[in-house]
Amino acid sequence: MFNFTEVYEKSVRVIKERPDGSDYVNFDTVLSTRECLINVDYIVSVRPYEFTSSVDMRRVEESFPAGTKFCSLVLDGNSFRTSEMVTVGSFEKFCRLFQKNKS
């Protein structure tokens, strides 16, 4: 089994104020993390991941320290809701980790 930190989109409630002073509720999407545990046998590939859209880059800047690296884990698609998961960690970290597990 492998423990990693998944990056996912989370909806948060934001209270905003109208020009007349009344409040209203709006929902915004932010990036958050959660701990996950997965069987290594279900991992098909690992590759470096970069957020490319300006909206995603803004979310990353708001949610993570500068220089944070991300990877994409591609999983066996028959067993999971989504076959790709974005994780926190450099590609080199995952290479070292899976080389140790291979031995």
Image (cartoon, grey):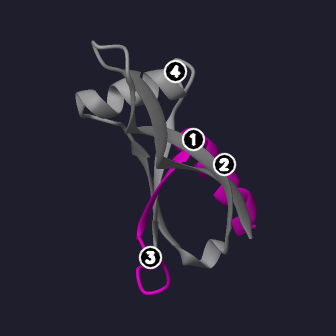
- Determine crowd level at label 4: few under 14, some 14-19, many 20+ residues with C-alpha closer than 10 A: few
Membership of 101 in magenta stretch: yes
From the viewer's perspective, is residue 66 above or below residue 88?
above
Q: Position of residue 8 (x, y in %)?
A: 49, 50
Q: Secondary structure at mark 2?
A: helix
Q: Position of residue 68 (x, y in %)?
A: 54, 28
Q: Which residue is mark 4?
A: 67
User: In the image, 75: left or right of 99?
Assistant: left
From the viewer's perspective, is residue 82 above or below residue 92?
below
- Determine crowd level at label 3: few under 14, some 14-19, many 20+ residues with C-alpha closer than 10 A: few
Say which of marks 4 and 2 sits in front.
4
What residue is at 55 percent from the left and 38 percent from the top? 90
Q: Amino acid at mark 2?
A: Arg
What residue is at 25 percent from the left and 27 percent from the top? 54
Is mark 3 in CB contact (under 8 Å) with mark 4? no
Is mark 1 in CB contact (under 8 Å) with mark 4? no
Q: Which mark is residue 92?
A: 1
Real-space CA distance between mark 4 and mark 2, rounded to the nearest whole angstrom? 20 Å
Q: Which label's residue is closer to the chain start, 1 or 4? A: 4
From the viewer's perspective, is residue 32 above or below residue 37?
above
Relative to the observer, which residue lies in front, 92 or 7?
7
Q: Secondary structure at mark 3?
A: loop
Quarter in which the C terminus is drawn: bottom right
Q: Amino acid at mark 1?
A: Glu
- Chain part drawn in magenta: 76-103
Real-space CA distance between mark 1 and mark 4, rounded to the nearest whole angstrom? 14 Å
Q: Which residue is mark 2?
A: 96
Real-space CA distance between mark 2 and mark 3, rounded to the nearest whole angstrom? 27 Å
Q: Secondary structure at mark 1?
A: helix
Is mark 2 in CB contact (under 8 Å) with mark 1? yes
Q: Amino acid at mark 3?
A: Arg
User: In the image, 52: left or right of 1?
Assistant: left
